[in-house]
Image (cartoon, rainbow, N blue to C red):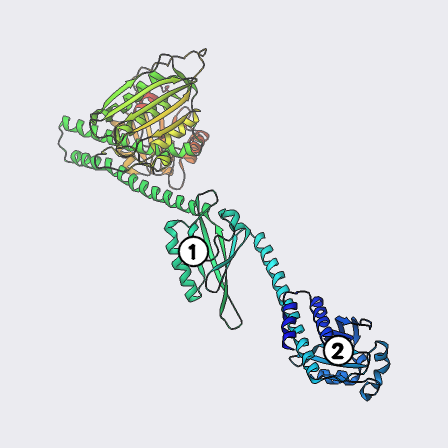
Amino acid sequence: MYRFLLALDDAIRGLLAPQEITQTAAAMLGRFLGVQRCAYAHVDQQQGTFTVTGDYVNGVPSIVGQYRSDNFGAAFVQLSEAGLPYVVNDTESDARVADVRDAYRQIAIRAVISVPVLKEGRFVAGMALHQNAPRMWQAQEIKLLELVASRCWESIERSRVTQASIESEAKFRTITNAMPQMVWSTLADGNHDYFNQQWYEYTGVPRGSTDGAGWNGIFHPDDQAHARERWAHSLATGETYEIQYRLRHHSGQYRWVLGRALPVHDEHGAIIRWMGTCTDIDAQKRAEVELREMNSRKDEFLAMLAHELRNPLAPIASAAYLLKLGKSDPARIEQVSDIITRQVHHMTALVDDLLDVSRVTRGQIELEQHPVDLNAMVISAIEQARPLIDLRQHHLHLDAGPAGLTVCGDRTRLVQVVANLLNNAAKYTSQGGQIGLVLASEGAHARITVTDNGSGIEPGLLPHIFDLFTQGARTPDRAQGGLGLGLTLVKSIVTLHGGTVTADSDGAGKGSRLTITLPLRGASQPVTAQAAPPVAQPVRPARLLIVDDNVDAAESLRALLVAQGHAVQVASEPHRALALALAEPPDIYILDIGLPDMDGYELSRRLHAQPGNAGAMFIALTGYGQGNDLVLSKKAGFDYHFIKPLDMQAFHAILAGRKER
């Protein structure tokens, strides 16, 4: 018997289909016991059905099919539901079969053993042996039938679980392969046993190579220890695993990834598995790093701006204190005046740089388009940068280009560009250093190269040298300072001219080389001579009204204009200005824009409406200097728009050309 059971186990162990299991078991048992029929059936006790799924027959018909349970007799049903074998040695003489004897005769049953399979008290299956002649069934035959029936049930249930697991695994793989993320799972001990298709496509590693603990090897070397430590902590505590690390992409690059895993618990709360995902966050991570760097550069820039604006304030304050002492020494007064003028020009240049960057980066700058002689332009740029070069005792070598090199563009802006490069070279080169400027032609382009043997550019800074707020390390000998805006302006202006600018350096302390290329004009296009500057004309005294809520600014300007021979009145608020103008209309109005109660635009419109102001000149003097501010000034009736502080040379030129009323 035991050898038979071992053979049966071997035969049905690899089978998955329930029908194959029952047919194999029935055939082996039928032959072993020499019966004419052996059948296995599933029972639906609630529906009262008895379904034969497989049988073995020898000289009798198959009975595979569905029956009512009571087709086999009330005694059969009663004993089966009680978990007891139903044994009949001869159906013709057994009174328990009287009610179904004809049915037994039709399917050739003269002797029968049927054993039930009960699970949780329910009659769920049965197995039977049939003979078409009387047979005295032995106890060991009944016992063997019970064992085979139980094995069939267990094998069928195991196959159902296995099939369900296969189907579940297939669904799981289908779902995970459809997900955009990399999906993985591990056993309870943390050893990886599954990665989805995205993992292998992303990493490019062979299948199975990252199973177990092999996954850690494709992390960035600097992240491996932290990842192992964090994973070990989650395995020990059951806490959610979440970490950012760099994973080797199939391209060979390391990309930032968010790894996350949750434990899977059984009904008792024990961890049986971990399910995890990896999400590529490289673009987001790099954007965060770039944003932090930009914020850092912005903070450095603001600190530098405060420093650069305070620098000229110190000599201005000292000069003002000297004037306050009241000693009328003409030489001292001239010296103080020169100090204040230089420092105000310096502050104005700083503010102009800020405004230029704002206009250029927003595309609000308009270039003049005229033929520009590059040799003459370079000489003008050197003249602008010469004071700083001489102050730091640098040696400047100029290699001029061939005559007739011209481009079409804005001469003033191009001078600004080259002067910026020369000033940068002077700032970043130690005293007594070497600066070179080479102008040459190369095909259809002109090339301007500025070199120095100064502090150079670090490799990490080189790709960002033209970015806003970027500047090199500040050293104690850099007395001239700066805001880190010059090269941003250079690139923007050169780009607007259809050119390019590049920066090169062999590293810190090895100097730098900045090269501008610009498209040359066609040889057939003549160079237009620049108009000679107008000869200064004498200024006639005029009556002026200054309106500014900054009393100090208004009074200092009044004192300056009075000293020049003009008659000047001052009003600090618009309604006072309207009253003064109505009583005695002036020749010239100088109006601030940011006034209390009524802005300068509205004040200008109201003054234009008053009698006696026909032919009067209206000048806006304000801190607002954007393109839109100029449009608003013109609409409000202003003839000129000045940005504070007042450019006295330009103002005198306006007064010299003023017509008498």
Observer-nearest of 388 and 312: 388
Residue 430, placed above or below residue 540: below
> Residue 285: x and y, percent?
43, 47
Q: Nearer the viewer, residue 41 or 365?
A: 41
| Residue situated in front as seen by the camera: 217 or 595 | 217
Binning the other alpha carbons within 10 Å of mark 2 as few (below 14), some (14 to 19) or many (20 upward) gives many
Left or right of 365, for residue 569: left
Q: Residues within 10 Å of mark 1 (few under 14, many from 20)?
A: some
- Indicate the quadrant where residue 622 lies: top left
Say whether residue 583 is visible: no
First in sequence, mark 1 or 2: give its number. Answer: 2
Q: Label 1, label 2: how many angstroms apart (C-alpha)?
A: 64 Å
Residue that mark 1 sits on: 243
Amino acid type at image mark 1:
Ile
Query: In the figure, is residue 537 to the left or right of 181?
Result: left
Decide: is 590 above or below 67. Answer: above
* Residue at point 42%, 54% (across, down): 216
Q: Secondary structure at mark 1?
A: strand
Q: Secondary structure at mark 2?
A: strand
Q: Which of the two residues, 561 or 129, is positioned nearer the viewer here?
A: 129
**Numbered circle sitting on residue 129:** 2
- Marks 2 and 1: in contact by CB < 8 Å? no
Residue ID at (40%, 49%): 220
